[in-house]
Image (cartoon, rainbow, N blue to C red):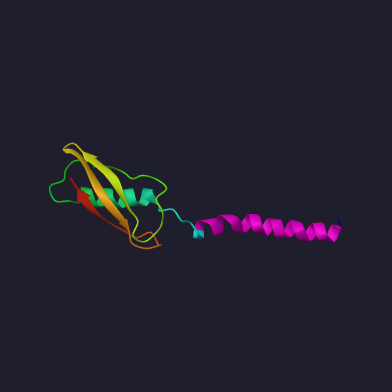
């Protein structure tokens, strides 16, 4: 292999290594469940009369597909609850409803 060919391949490899994290992040097919937990926790703690801290736990690796539904667990000193979470679109927007 000539020096010129090696140099060309090396440059291509460097570009590929540089672009991989950006391409993988942009094409993520998994919902950011940490963000879902933060949104649900903020909502739950803003409910009138809610004075206790709330913990929220959502299962990881949920598909980023419109219509996908999963359950998150919420708890405070009064008990344990579930939120039925629906993924609205591939941008990661969600909606949820509290279940007793």
Residue 12 % position (x, y): 71, 60
Residue 22 % position (x, y): 55, 58
Task: Work out which residue is located at the far left of the displayed protein and give it.
Answer: 49
Q: Residue at x 22, y 49 (%)?
A: 44
Q: Quadrant of residue 59?
A: top left
Question: Quick check: 98 left or right of 21?
Answer: left
Q: Residue at x 73, y 59 (%)?
A: 11
Q: Residue at x 37, y 63 (%)?
A: 89
Q: Which residues are magenta?
A: 2-25
Residue 95 lies in the magenta-colored region: no
Residue 69 % position (x, y): 32, 54
Q: Quadrant of residue 17?
A: bottom right
In the depicted structure, whether residue 25 falls above or below residue 74: below
Q: Between 27 and 68, which is closer to the camera in this rendering?
A: 68
Residue 26 % position (x, y): 50, 60
- The overriding secondary structure of the stretch rendered in magenta is helix
Task: Work out which residue is located at the far right of the displayed protein and give it.
Answer: 2
Question: Quick check: 96 left or right of 64?
Answer: left
Question: Quick check: 4 left or right of 81?
Answer: right
Residue 10 lies in the magenta-colored region: yes
Q: Quadrant of the N terminus?
A: bottom right
Numbered label tally: 0
């Amino acid at each position: 292999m000539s020096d010129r060919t090696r140099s060309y391949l090396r440059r291509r490899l460097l570009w590929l290594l540089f672009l991989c994290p950006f391409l993988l992040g942009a094409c993520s097919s998994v919902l950011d469940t940490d963000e879902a937990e933060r949104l649900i926790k903020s909502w739950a703690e803003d409910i009138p009369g809610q004075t206790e801290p709330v913990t929220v736990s959502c299962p990881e690796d949920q598909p980023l597909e419109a219509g996908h539904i999963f359950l998150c667990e919420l708890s405070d000193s009064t008990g344990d609850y579930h939120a039925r979470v629906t993924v609205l679109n591939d941008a990661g927007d969600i909606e949820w409803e509290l279940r007793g």
